[in-house]
Image (cartoon, rainbow, N blue to C red):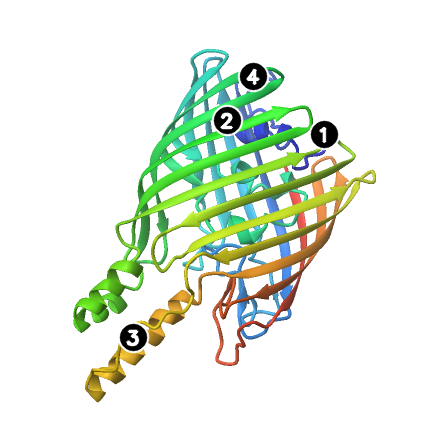
Amino acid sequence: MPKLHPTPVLTAVAACVALAPTHALAGHDEGSAWTLGGFGTLSAVHSSEKQADFSANPLNPGQAGATRDWSFAVDSRLATQLAYNGGHWSAVLQVVSERNLTNSWKPVVEWANVQYQASPELSLRFGRIALPLFLSGDYRKASYALTWVRTPIELYGALPISNSDGIDASYRWKLGDVKNTTQVLYGSTQLRLSDTQRAEAHHLAGVSNTSNIGALTVRATALKGDLQMKLGEQLFTALRQFGPQGEILARRYEPDRKRATVLSIGASYDPGQWFVMAEAGRVNARSLLGDKSAGYISGGYRFGSLTPYATFSKVVANTPTHVDGLDLAALPPPYAAAGQRLNRELNSWLSMIAVQDNVSAGLRWDAGSNVAVKFQYDHVRPRKGTSGTLENLQPGYRYGRSFGLFSAALDFVF
């Protein structure tokens, strides 16, 4: 099997996770239309910041730092995939087990869709479908397909959702020597935040275009959706008790019933011996979840089975991460004290809008035809009075302090 790196071929990999030779189900011939395979990651992560926990994904607490000296949950996961290819009709079911916000490793359905190949150029799908976000968005969980230990969290962590329930259509076309695939989609998605709370995005609609010419791949995506989530509900109820100024703050920052938009563009050039890639994106949730711009540039060189690489990534906030909040000057002392507490709570939420930069270096070793060993060191600096991508802040946490992160991972496919 050829080694997989962030190359143009991986856009095709994402269509059916052709990350490894899949094996026919028991009782079927080699030519069976059914295939079964999977992928996984075993990782260990150490953070020098002991007053907070590092998380590679807002939906996974991670627990590297304050909770555990070494965490095995930041990047570890196991997935299996069942696929059917019957000519014009095909289908895929992918189930992934990884740590979630409820401290569970319960498997969840990542993909479950049916595709109809209407013509050589046009395909239609319905079901649970991978969102065409970012260059590595289709296979961000299949770490074996990545050179890095994980996708740059400054960009990919800004929008952790990876699928939607709905329909899409993809059309392949050429413009001179440029091969294009244009995808349009419509659907919805739901995230489980706790045992009792969920976040939903309805009327998800988007368009994405991937262009290939030789070793160059370019992908641009635009996506919008309507958010429904009760995050910070008690804060906004209390703010509204302070009249018009509280109502203005509540309407501005509550995430429920807000339009979210995503714009991204990325390019990868990979002639084989070396690669360089860069992406930039903006995620605007029009609420306390923030309006963020992020991007990275990464490159590496392949020496046989070894690939050293380096990455610089950054995320900035396009809205303030600290506000004055309620005007307390004209309020009686008891109300002023209550308003001051609400202002502190609001700014505590806003300080979680990530602003940080990250310089990382790593090494990938392709130890076998379906096994890769990776080591990566990140130097991370939260900025602008925010905690960056850190979570579970402890009383001794100091804003603006940089920290080091060491990660080791074993990626495999089967």
Structural distance between the alpha carbons of marks 4 and 3: 56 Å
First-in-chain label (1 vs 3)? 1
Q: Is residue 290 left or right of residue 259?
A: right
Answer with mark 4 or mark 1, whichever residue precedes in sequence. Answer: 1
Q: Could you tell which of marks 2 and 4 lies nearer the N-terminus?
A: 2
Instruction: State the SS at label 2.
Output: strand
Q: Residue 342 shows which numbered tag?
A: 3
Work out which quarter of the rendered image holds the N terminus and state it.
top right
Q: Residue at x 54, y 77 (%)?
A: 398
Q: Which residue is farthest top?
A: 119
Q: Gap in Å between the C-alphas at discs 2 and 4?
A: 32 Å
Q: Amino acid at mark 4?
A: Leu
Residue occupied by mark 4: 175
Residue 83 numbered tag: 2
Closer mark to the observer between disc 2 and disc 4: 4
Residue furthest right as drawn: 303
Vertical arrangement, residue 337 with respect to residue 290, above or below: below
Residue 131 can be seen in this image: no
Name which residue lies at 53% across and 55% down: 315
In the image, what residue type sits under mark 2? Ala
Residue shown at 44% from the left, 67% from the top:
351
Q: Could you say which is closer to the camera, residue 237 or residue 249?
A: 249
Tell me the crowding category of disc 3: few under 14, some 14 to 19, or many 20 or more residues within 10 angstroms, Cα based: some
The residue mark sitting in front, 4 or 1, is 4
Badge 1 is on which residue?
2
Mark 4 to mark 1 CA distance (whole Å) = 29 Å
Q: Secondary structure at mark 4?
A: strand
Q: Alpha-carbon neighbours of circle 2 within 10 Å: few (<14), some, or many (≥20)? A: many
